[in-house]
Amino acid sequence: QKEVEQDPGPLSVPEGAIVSLNCTYSNSAFQYFMWYRQYSRKGPELLMYTYSSGNKEDGRFTAQVDKSSKYISLFIRDSQPSDSATYLCAMSAPNLNFGNEKLTFGTGTRLTIIP
Amino acid sequence: DSGVTQTPKHLITATGQRVTLRCSPRSGDLSVYWYQQSLDQGLQFLIQYYNGEERAKGNILERFSAQQFPDLHSELNLSSLELGDSALYFCASSPDSSTDTQYFGPGTRLTVL
């Protein structure tokens, strides 16, 4: 079983819809949770960063972390064609000696917003 | 543009050969990370360097090695290449040794024939 599981999709939704992307994980030591967006033939870019449980909102994007269920979500409101990309979740555990452990990524969900 | 540069963009080579991928981190960033991305495995962490020293190792094969130079640029060396090494190789950088905020380069696409 992988440490981080993510539905690869593909996921296609009409423009303006609310999109929900999810990851589950098995390592209870994970404390830092991120969502990266990767456009075709580009490197991943950091979209959202959350520490521990709770919600974080940034414009049309909301990240949720439920540590009790080991489940994280990214919601995109009023989705736009420019949101079409692959979305990767990533997470890491704290390291007492130096910052955090390495990032562990999900395999990514390919999202297409249909105009 | 993340500020991380990688060269070359594309590399085509034959099995058994050796290649070097180069990465320049964002100005002021001390950590460099290397990742391999393939269709079936997703984004896999290979190795991290912080200010010239190896900080963390992931799923890096013994045929692969990396280093970070005094000017903080980094090179990833891949030797005895196999067909399965064909992938996208990304470099990322962060300001310090903490891994939570990483800025990725555009990647090098390696094709082994």
Image (cartoon, helix red, strand yellow):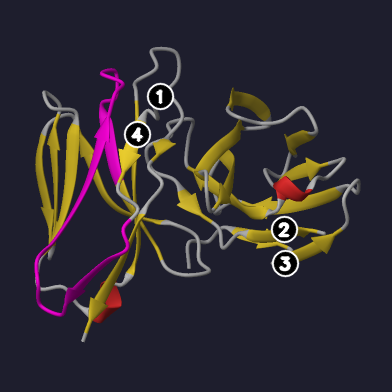
Spatial distance from mark 3 to mark 4, Cα to Cα? 30 Å
- Whether marks 1 and 4 lie on the same chain: yes
Q: Which residue is mark 4?
A: A4
Q: Residue A3, located in which quarter of the rendered image?
A: top left
Measuring 49% from the left and 30% from the top, which residue is drawn there?
B97
Q: Which residues are magenta?
A: A9-34
Q: Residue flagged by tag 2: what amino acid is it?
A: Leu
Q: Furthest residue to the bottom? A: A115
Closer to the chain start, of discs 3 and 2, is 3
Residue A69 on image: x %, y %: 13, 27
Q: Nearer the viewer, mark 3 or mark 4?
A: 4
Residue A44 vertical placement versus A66 (above, below): below
| Disc 4 crowd, CA 10 A, few/some/many (<14, 14-19, 20+) | some
Spatial distance from mark 4 to mark 2, Cα to Cα? 26 Å
Q: Is any atom of residue A91 visible in this view? A: no
Residue A86 vertical placement versus A71 (above, below): below
Q: Which residue is mark 2?
A: B110
With B113 as the anchor, is B98 left or right in this view? left
Q: Nearer the viewer, mark 1 or mark 4?
A: 4
Give residue A99's mark.
1
Residue A59 on image: x %, y %: 12, 64
Query: Regarding mark 3 in the picture, which secondary structure is present there?
Result: strand
- Chain under label 3? B
Q: Which residue is mark 3?
A: B10
Residue A15 on image: x %, y %: 15, 80
Q: Nearer the viewer, mark 3 or mark 1?
A: 3
Query: Regarding mark 4 in the picture, which secondary structure is present there?
Result: strand
